[in-house]
């Protein structure tokens, strides 16, 4: 895959899917900016691992829901590299409860972490990329944003919102050669899904046509494709990475 740009910021990249996206994009030749929120030592270890493989990486710490901190983080990147070529809005959380028991604060916490952070990233990314007349942004939404799920009204609303929002950004970015797309993972083996009980996991596996959970690198390769020049005529699209669970 060919990349005309030189660097990428991945939010929430110190572990799981975000870390794998960083590894894969670094291997494709991009300088990866690893964003972490709470564990600098894990982000530093990932940077060292990527560099030990002969690739380029840097670390930038901020909470993606904090507008000022996000903007400061982007400033650090553009001051260092002169541009932001690509952005992956990956940071996300869950806080599952049946809707009847879900407090408004539980709802808003997930909307802030997933949807608001993505909005800030897309808006600020578009500002920078508009000036350079080049850029590509991939937002990590979810199968749950496409089909809903019991116990996840907050998460579904945030991820469905990310999909609709990305399409709106795609309209606004198109004339400036800035593309916006989403990847919607199904069940991917990470810390987020490890917390589910074995019984729930086995039941889910039975419903997946490919009969297994996905791996983080399978999400990362889809992200790489959408960011790359190979997807130069693709914007406002949603790429499912779900083993056929939702077609
Ligand atoms: P994970 O293992 O829970 O990791 C989430 C990452 O996001 C962590 O590094 C976390 O940092 C970071 N993060 C959370 N809130 C943040 C914030 N406000 N600012 C900066 N970083 C923040 O989750 P994952 O499974 O890798 O999921 C990554 C993305 O894929 C999420 O958007 C998730 O919704 C989506 N997704 C996952 C699956 C799946 O099956 N795993 C399926 C569909 C979609 P800390 O270490 O500081 O907490």
Image (tube, rainbow, N blue to C red):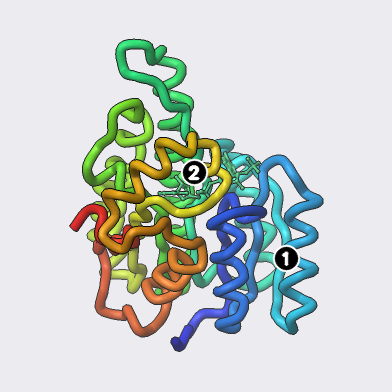
Residue 150 versus residue 120 in the image, above or below? above
Rendering coords of residue 201 (x, y %): 42, 42
Q: CA distance from mark 2 to mark 1?
A: 28 Å
Label 2 with label 1: CB-CB less than 8 Å? no
Q: Residue at x 45, y 30 (%)?
A: 110
Q: Nearer the viewer, residue 106 or 170?
A: 106
Disc 1 target residue: 58
To which quarter of the image does residue 232 belong? bottom left
Rendering coords of residue 159 (x, y %): 34, 42
Query: Which element is circle 1 on?
Result: strand
Q: Residue at x 79, y 78 (%)?
A: 52
Residue 75 versus residue 202 in the image, above or below? below
Q: Is mark 2 within 8 Å of ligand 1?
A: yes
What count of labels does the image hold?
2
Q: Is 177 left, or right, of 92 in this rendering?
A: left
To which quarter of the image does residue 18 belong? bottom right
Q: Is 127 left, or right, of 32 in this rendering?
A: left
* The N terminus lies in quadrant: bottom left
Disc 2 target residue: 193
Eye-nearest disc, 2 or 1: 2
Query: Which element is circle 2 on?
Result: helix
Let me know if residue 103 appears in the view: yes
Q: Residue at x 56, y 53 (%)?
A: 11
Q: Is 66 left, or right, of 237 in this rendering?
A: right
Q: Work out whether mark 2 precedes mark 1 in sequence or the reverse, and give the earlier one.
A: 1
């Amino acid at each position: 895959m060919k990349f005309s740009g030189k660097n990428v910021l991945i939010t929430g990249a110190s572990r799981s899917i975000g870390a794998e996206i960083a590894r894969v994009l670094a291997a494709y030749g991009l300088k990866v900016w690893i964003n972490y929120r709470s564990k600098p030592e894990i982000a530093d270890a990932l940077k060292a691992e990527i560099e030990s493989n002969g690739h380029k990486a840097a670390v930038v710490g901020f909470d993606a829901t904090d507008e000022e901190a996000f903007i400061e983080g982007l400033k650090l990147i553009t001051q260092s590299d002169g541009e932001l070529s690509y952005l992956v809005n990956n940071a996300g959380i869950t806080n599952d409860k049946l809707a009847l028991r879900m407090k408004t604060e539980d709802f808003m916490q997930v909307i802030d972490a997933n949807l608001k952070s993505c909005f800030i990233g897309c808006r600020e990314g578009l500002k920078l990329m508009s000036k350079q007349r080049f850029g590509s942004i991939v937002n990590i939404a979810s199968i749950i944003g496409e089909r809903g799920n019991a116990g996840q009204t907050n998460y579904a609303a945030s991820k469905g919102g990310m999909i609709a929002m990305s399409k709106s950004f795609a309209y606004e970015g198109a004339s400036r050669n800035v593309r916006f797309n989403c990847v919607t993972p199904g069940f991917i083996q990470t810390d987020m899904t490890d917390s589910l009980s074995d019984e729930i996991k086995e039941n889910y596996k039975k419903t997946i046509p490919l009969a297994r959970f996905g791996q983080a690198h399978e999400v990362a390769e889809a992200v790489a494709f959408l960011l790359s020049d190979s997807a130069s005529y693709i914007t406002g699209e949603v790429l499912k990475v779900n083993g056929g669970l939702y077609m």
